[in-house]
Amino acid sequence: MSRSPSEVPDPSPGLTLFSHEGKPYRFDPGALCLELLPTGGPGELARFEVLHRPADLVTWAGRGRLAAGLDLTVTEDELVAARTLRDALFPLAADRAHGRPLRARDVDIVNTAAVPPPLVTRLAPDGSRGWAPGATGTGLLSTVARDAIDLFSGPYADRVRECGAHDCRLLFVDTSRPGRRRWCAMEHCGNREKVRAHRARKATQDVPGPPRSAGGPPTC
């Protein structure tokens, strides 16, 4: 599982991540709150941490599905709060994906983050969406937490999935019409699993059959 977000902006929803081999691929988790998860996480996921400075959270906010032009100020305390919220969102999303009860401590963290006013949007004269000035990290986290509440309590709560690859823990919400999305990205884990399955089938086909007795039927 690769977790490093790209510096290169992309107009499509989601994030550009990199494989272990350094190959970029597009990952759309389907919700703002789930976009925060590839920045690191609790326990063993801490090795993927990218939110080291307040500027890193500002950079993250500019890469995802939030509208462009957000003039955001983040403090050290807000950065710590962002990591705390993310580390609660990860097990909540995993619990939703696997049908487990939500843990009260993680729920409390999300609810607390959602209390302050969220980011304020504005309509620009050209019809596009913009942001009110004075955006803070606290407002950003409130927006993320409220998005999580909407997701985990809404019609797509049962569509939260963990990537089907054996070595990937990326989480996403399946917003496709048939609801059969299995992979974080078809171009990444989907293709790897196809290659793995093909090699397994070929290895089975290449296994020699039982020896035959001379001049007689196949042996048991």
Image (cartoon, helix red, strand yellow):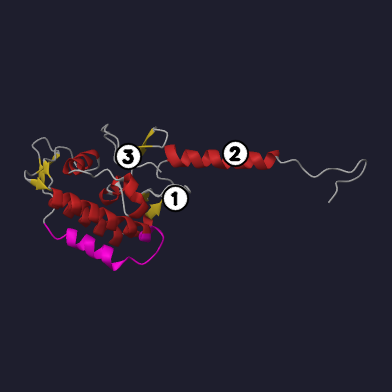
Image point 35% across, 50% down: which residue? 45
Mark identifier at residue 199: 2
Q: Identify the residue at the far right of this view.
A: 215
Q: Residues within 10 Å of mark 3 (few under 14, many from 20)?
A: many
Tell me the distance, in whole angstroms, between the alpha carbons under discs 2 and 3.
29 Å
Which-is-in-front pick, marks 1 and 3?
3
Tell me the distance, in whole angstroms, between the alpha carbons under discs 1 and 3.
26 Å
Q: Position of residue 12 (x, y in %)?
A: 29, 37
Using the image as rendered, state which of residue 144 and residue 175 is in the foreground.
Answer: 144
Q: Position of residue 95 (x, y in %)?
A: 37, 61
The residue beneath circle 3 is: 4
The residue beneath circle 1 is: 180
Q: Position of residue 220 (x, y in %)?
A: 83, 51
Q: Residues within 10 Å of mark 1 (few under 14, many from 20)?
A: few
- Mark 3: which secondary structure? loop
Residue type for callout 1: Arg
Mark nearer the N terminus (2 vs 1): 1
Which-is-in-front pick, marks 2 and 3?
3
From which residue to which does the magenta span run?
Answer: 95-116
Q: Are marks 2 and 3 in contact (CB under 8 Å)?
A: no
Against 104, is 205 above or below? Answer: above
Q: Residues within 10 Å of mark 2 (few under 14, many from 20)?
A: few
Image quarter of residue 104:
bottom left
Q: Quadrant of the N terminus?
A: top left
Image point 71% across, 41% down: which residue? 207
Image point 43% across, 46% down: which residue? 183
Using the image as rendered, state which of residue 149 and residue 24 is in the foreground.
Answer: 24
Residue type for callout 2: Arg
- Mark 1: which secondary structure? loop
Image point 69% across, 38% down: which residue? 206
* Residue 3 visible (yes or no): yes
Tell me the distance, in whole angstroms, between the alpha carbons under discs 2 and 1.
24 Å
